[in-house]
């Protein structure tokens, strides 16, 4: 260390008066020379002059300013400043702002400008331009290295992939089942037009018929109408023939689920020929060429129905119209025929099946009304007892609900005055019938108590002048 000090003194000579003040002590402490001078300082074991010390302080101040500037960008408003000595001075406390809001602020951070957003609001991620700005069609530059002449005349269209066999059933089955609810053939035609059926086009009629075989008679009628409306706009006659050919081949499998499938398919074929979906020579083309007994039975059934149509049978109504699609007068007529047939045959199971096949559970109150009126108009005990047994059976099996039964009786109560004009004993018979119905559990006590009764009239002789006589018994 002494050698270094001597070398430095040789390089920087000093005057004599300064030399006496420079070295306060020349003693060595454990081999180390301690030097003290106004212009010489020791920092971290290095001997530095006053000029080097000032540079070091300037660096510390610059570093502190950078650190302060960096912190102020995060927590602005604290009012921190730097003194002349490089110390951080806390100013007036200001409510700090959120760093997140500072990051999302689109104004300039340099303090310049008028505080407007960058690029007039057209910059930033996910921004396509200023609001209200309209882009003109971009002109193709033939000198562009990515220019392709073949792309100028291209026409882009939406292509729907054709349905395969796996997705066909999942797509078409909900459409047909929904059609059974609303009965709108135009909606089905629009949905099928939007699909690319491709080679599966001829599978639509066979799928609809297969679903109708397991459904009600009204659904079969809707299926026949659907096939007639789809032939032409959506399906061709060749598609229809191929579809019925497939049905005849699949009859052995269809019989397992629907035992009457051969007769039903024969009715569909006859209806299709009547609606001019199939040619008249379709059935004759299978003569002598069918080995399956089920297919032969279906073709025979269709041939018989077509011969009967020549004698006046209407094939277009062979399934009947289901539910509320029929007029009310026709439903009332069928219910009257059902009751008369039951009185003659006494088969309550057949009457129950026929009432269920009408598919009008909301109109069963009319059946109750017609049955009670038939009792009032009858002259014997047979009709009285048979109608009671039938209503009891229909009530226990819940085919006629409690609400429909109540509405039927209430309608008779309302019309009993008019019925009494044609049937003088109507009140008396109604009271007996209502009491029996209550005892058998067909109606409740509240409905029984609502039964109207005919009031007793007292007659006054003409010679009494309107004075009522006191009768003695």
Image (cartoon, rainbow, N blue to C red):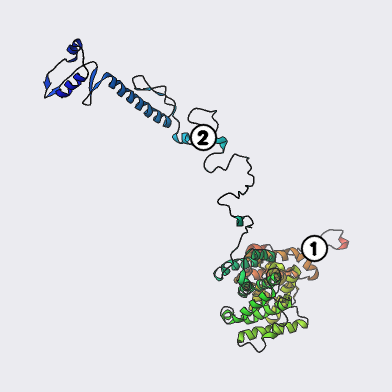
Tell me the number on the disc at residue 106.
2
Marks 1 and 2: which is nearer the front? 2
| Location of residue 403 (image quadrant) | bottom right
Q: Residues within 10 Å of mark 2 (few under 14, many from 20)?
A: some
Pinpoint residue 401: horizontal percent, then vertical percent: 63, 67
Q: Is residue 54 above or below residue 235?
A: above
Pinpoint residue 452: horizontal percent, then vertical percent: 72, 63
Pinpoint residue 166: horizontal percent, then vertical percent: 54, 70
Which residue is nearer to you in this view: 429 or 268? 268
Can residue 381 be seen here?
no
Q: Residues within 10 Å of mark 1 (few under 14, many from 20)?
A: few
- Could you tell me which secondary element the residue under label 1 belongs to? loop
| Location of residue 54 (image quadrant) | top left
Q: Which residue is mark 1?
A: 458
Total numbered labels placed on residues in the image: 2
- Could you tell me which secondary element the residue under label 2 belongs to? loop
């Amino acid at each position: 260390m002494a050698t270094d000090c001597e070398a430095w003194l040789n390089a920087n000579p000093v005057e004599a008066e300064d030399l006496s003040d420079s070295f306060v002590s020349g003693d060595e402490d454990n081999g180390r020379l301690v030097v003290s001078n106004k212009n010489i300082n020791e920092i971290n074991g290095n001997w530095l002059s006053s000029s080097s010390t000032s540079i070091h302080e300037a660096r510390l101040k610059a570093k502190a300013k950078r650190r302060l500037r960096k912190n102020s960008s995060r927590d602005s408003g604290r009012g921190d400043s730097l003194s002349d000595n490089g110390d951080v001075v806390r100013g007036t406390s200001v409510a700090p702002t959120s760093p997140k809001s500072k990051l999302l602020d689109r104004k300039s951070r340099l303090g310049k400008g008028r505080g407007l957003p960058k690029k007039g609001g057209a910059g930033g991620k996910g921004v396509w331009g200023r609001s209200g700005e309209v882009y003109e069609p971009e002109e193709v530059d033939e000198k562009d290295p990515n220019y392709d002449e073949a792309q100028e005349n291209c026409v882009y269209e939406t292509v729907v992939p054709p349905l395969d066999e796996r997705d066909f059933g999942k797509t078409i089955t909900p459409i047909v089942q929904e059609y059974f609810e609303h009965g709108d053939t135009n909606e089905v035609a629009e949905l099928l037009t939007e699909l690319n059926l491709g080679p599966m086009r001829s599978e639509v009629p066979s799928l609809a018929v297969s679903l109708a075989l397991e459904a009600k008679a009204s659904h079969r009628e809707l299926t026949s109408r659907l096939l007639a409306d789809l032939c032409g706009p959506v399906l061709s006659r060749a598609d229809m023939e191929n579809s019925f050919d497939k049905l005849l081949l699949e009859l052995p499998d269809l019989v397992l689920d629907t035992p009457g499938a051969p007769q039903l398919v024969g009715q569909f074929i006859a209806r299709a020929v009547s609606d001019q979906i199939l040619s008249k020579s379709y059935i004759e083309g299978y003569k002598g060429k069918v080995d399956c007994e089920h297919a032969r039975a279906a073709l025979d059934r269709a041939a018989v129905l077509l011969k009967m149509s020549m004698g006046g049978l209407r094939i277009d109504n062979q399934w009947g119209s289901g539910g509320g699609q029929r007029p009310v007068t026709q439903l009332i007529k069928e219910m009257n025929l059902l009751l008369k047939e039951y009185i003659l045959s006494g088969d309550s199971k057949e009457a129950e099946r026929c009432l269920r096949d009408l598919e009008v559970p909301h109109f069963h109150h009319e059946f109750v009304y017609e049955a009670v009126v038939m009792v009032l108009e009858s002259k014997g005990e047979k009709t009285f007892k048979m109608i009671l047994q039938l209503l009891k059976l229909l009530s226990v099996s819940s085919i006629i609900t409690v609400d429909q039964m109540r509405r039927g009786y209430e309608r008779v109560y309302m019309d009993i005055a008019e019925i009494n004009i044609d049937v003088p004993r109507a009140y008396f018979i109604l009271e007996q019938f209502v009491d029996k119905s209550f005892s058998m559990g067909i109606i409740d006590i509240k409905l029984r108590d609502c039964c109207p009764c005919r009031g007793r009239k007292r007659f006054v002789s003409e010679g009494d002048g309107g004075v009522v006589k006191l009768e003695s018994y």
